[in-house]
Image (cartoon, helix red, strand yellow):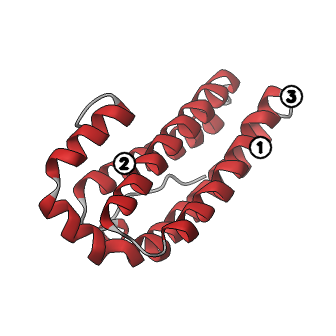
Amino acid sequence: MEKIIWSRDLELGIDIIDAQHKRIVDYINDINGAIMSGDRESVYLVMEQLRDYTMDHFAFEEQLLEQSGYTLLDSHKQVHRRFEAKVEAMVTELGNGTDPMGVARRAKNTMKVWLIQHIKHEDQDYLPVVKKTLKKNQNWINSSLKRIFGSATV
């Protein structure tokens, strides 16, 4: 299985969001590494880390969109909730004893496709509004990052 290689066509031009997306890509690649090595324990650990980090990313992104007055926020949240449900279902499968390598392969493929499509479509839609907000609200962004991620840097 191939790793995801971060490229400029996945960048939104919002450093903090791009950094979070890159971290999600790293987790997906960590799943790939666990599959390649056959390390079942790593599959469990990475899936939980990916789930937790993705939920934190969604929380930050949604707060940023709300702060920006993004008119399609409710729709964007629904997309996030559907994805969270998929990830949570896979983590639950692991907890129920489903073949971890099979779940990991499905998770890697699902997450890879979803993330790339989400960045290139739904996330592109909010760029103009969010970029205006970023210029005006750096203090809000720093406090939100600290609240959600525990640090102003991700």
Q: Is residue 116 above or below residue 2?
A: below
Check if mark 3's residue and mark 1's residue have beta carbons within 8 Å: no
Which residue is nearer to you in this view: 98 or 4?
A: 98
Foreground pick, 131 / 33:
131
Residue at (78% x, 32% y) in the render:
94
Q: Circle 2 — which element?
A: helix
Rendered-image quadrant of the C terminus = top left
Residue drawn at the location 32% of the way across and 59% of the way down: 67
As displayed, is residue 39 above or below residue 133? above
Identify which residue is drawn at 13% across, 63% down: 135
Task: Rate crowding at label 1 as few (under 14), some (14 to 19) or many (20 or more) other CA atoms within 10 Å.
Answer: few
Query: Picture coordinates of residue 113 (x, y %)?
Result: 59, 64
Question: Quadrant of the rendered structure where residue 78 is?
Answer: bottom right
Residue 61, image x, y percentages: 40, 55
Residue in front for this viewpoint, 135 or 3: 135
Residue 147 can be seen in this image: yes
Residue under label 2? 20
Distance of label 3 from label 1 (alpha carbons)? 10 Å
Residue at numbered disc 1: 89
Kind of residue sitting beneath label 2: Gln
What separation in Å lies between label 2 and label 3 (alpha carbons)? 29 Å
Q: Is the residue marked by circle 2 packed among few (<14), some (14-19), or many (20+) residues within 10 Å?
A: many
Task: In this rendered view, identify the residue nearer to me: 66 or 14.
Answer: 66
Residue found at the very far top of the displayed protein: 41
- Numbered circle sitting on residue 96: 3
Give the amino acid type for the residue marked by disc 3 in the picture.
Asn
First in sequence: mark 2 vs mark 1: 2
Contact flag, marks 2 and 1 (Cβ < 8 Å): no
Q: Residue at x 75, y 42 (%)?
A: 90
Which of marks 1 and 3 precedes in the sequence? 1
In the rendered structure, the answer to whether residue 91 lies left or right of residue 126 reads right
